[in-house]
Image: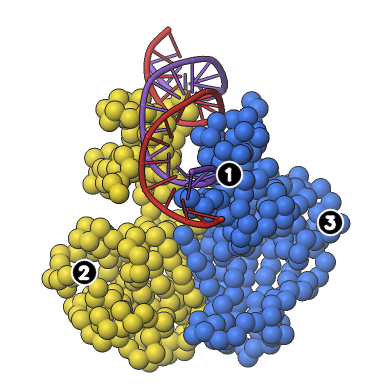
Chain colours: A yellow, B blue, C red, D purple
Amino acid sequence: MRTPRYKQLHQQLKADILIGRYEEGNLLPSENTLSAKHSMTRMMVRQALSALEQEGYITRRQGKGSIVCAHQPALGLLSFRGFSEVVGETEHSATSQFLSKPQLIKWNEGFFFDLSENEHQAGCIAIERLRQVDDQPVMLEYTYLPNLNIPEFCQKQWVDSSLFRTLYQHYQLEITSVDQRIRAVTAKVKIAAQLDLDVGTPILHIHRKYGTSRQGFFVYSSLFCNTEHYAIGSIIR
Amino acid sequence: MRTPRYKQLHQQLKADILIGRYEEGNLLPSENTLSAKHSMTRMMVRQALSALEQEGYITRRQGKGSIVCAHQPALGLLSFRGFSEVVGETEHSATSQFLSKPQLIKWNEGFFFDLSENEHQAGCIAIERLRQVDDQPVMLEYTYLPNLNIPEFCQKQWVDSSLFRTLYQHYQLEITSVDQRIRAVTAKVKIAAQLDLDVGTPILHIHRKYGTSRQGFFVYSSLFCNTEHYAIGSIIR
DNA sequence: GAGTGGTCTAGACCACCTG
DNA sequence: AGGTGGTCTAGACCACTCG
């Protein structure tokens, strides 16, 4: 069946916001304008806007309009927050680098989440990244993508150094959910070396399984974080 | 201004679900039935149901109806998941006990979140709880409520051993958001004793600030978790 | 006062599920 | 076939914001 028109409008507005057609803090066209321009009732326009609001792309204010929000990273989950930030001090510069080129390999035996037969046979694309804050290594992230209908992923240009934006740009994949397990462990030799820590330092170990807009397609991550100076923060609404 | 009628319907249906008037897995009355019974248009009934759906109280299926969901704890955030559970084994029995009676005290100097003048002057109600899984202590939780418009909290009967349900029952307070910082630390002497661990064992330390349905009212928690055998899990949609 | 979003009405046709 | 939720129309009045 064809996509409902209010969903088309919703997607178009979202795309416009993401490419910067409407900037942060600015107003979207009014509901009346949109309903006239797209020849649909205000109720349908409102349905599109409600979805945008729920996803956190806009807030609406009576008498004012629909305001484009600063867009947070997927699910507000990966953000670092320095402890200094909590008590109201300076910002930090975050960077990210690959430890190796993304490559197609076999899944590890005893992978940390159960895999479907499909996923297992497809093999996986492994990505190793190190994240730094103020030039200090802070997080080691191993990401695994099943090699299912993401042709030539390893050849693709990355968007904004962001896996999620890259997946969206090339395959229209959006992250819709996260299932995660968090533990405190001590740094073993290899991890300690990469994070520039003493062996035995307490670090966070997080396993994540991201759900996407494509049924049955998941993204897996294993993260090690040094939280001595920067806590992992998340805001959930 | 008076509460919009669709919001009234939304609240009433939610209350009915919470007290068990509509049971898990059963169907809510159809949209047509509700619109007739409450003399409002189907559009307004749908607005009420959409809100319920968004909050996770129901799911809707075309041709079937609105199905009442098993209701998950607020924001799905506090759930334990044994690592055995991840690989598909048995369930665990979780219990919770008070380490002291909830009592009104002054806020600590250098509290882990910034407090408003209001909150600071009101003082706080401190709650200390220990959570156990299979009779092993696993999580130590310190919770702090500003003593603002929650009269006689310390005298109230707790509902289901749940702070959030208790706040809802007595003061109609609902948790709407969480802002948290997660770190890995080592157990100090006092914490180690209470969690029955060796000093130096890596544990999770989480600071949380919960937003509520009452503007300006927040709940604060500081948690220490032993994740040796059970990871902290969360699912976010 | 003009324009915005918020609430609300009274209909319609469609896709889907179940008996 | 009859009932359910999903999409959609064409209007209306209200509360709020801003110039």
Residue under label 1: B30
Disc 2 marks which amino acid?
Answer: Ile
Residue under label 3: B156
Between residues B228 and B5, which one lies in front from this camera angle?
B5
For the residues tagged 2 and 1, is the chain the same? no
Disc 3 marks which amino acid?
Answer: Lys
Label 3 marks which chain's residue?
A: B
Residue plotted at (29% across, 74% down): A145
Give the SS element for disc 3.
Answer: loop
Label 2 marks which chain's residue?
A: A
Residue plotted at (62% across, 70% down): B223
User: How far across and how far down the image is residue B173, in percent?
Assistant: 69, 49
User: How far across and how far down the image is residue A50, in percent?
Assistant: 43, 40
Disc 1 marks which amino acid?
Answer: Ser
Between residues B140 and A31, which one lies in front from this camera angle?
A31
Q: Marks 2 and 3, how far apart in space?
A: 56 Å
Residue plotted at (69% across, 67% down): B142
Q: Estimate how packed mark 2 is, as few (under 14), some (14 to 19) or many (20 or more) residues with alpha carbons within 10 Å.
A: few
Judge whether residue A40 can be spotted in this image: yes
Residue under label 2: A150
Tell me the mark number nearer the camera, choosing from 2 and 3.
2
Residue plotted at (56% across, 64% down): B76
Give the SS element for disc 2.
Answer: loop
Give the SS element for disc 1.
Answer: loop
User: How far across and how far down the image is residue B228, in percent?
Assistant: 56, 86
Mark found first going from the N terminus, 1 or 3: 1
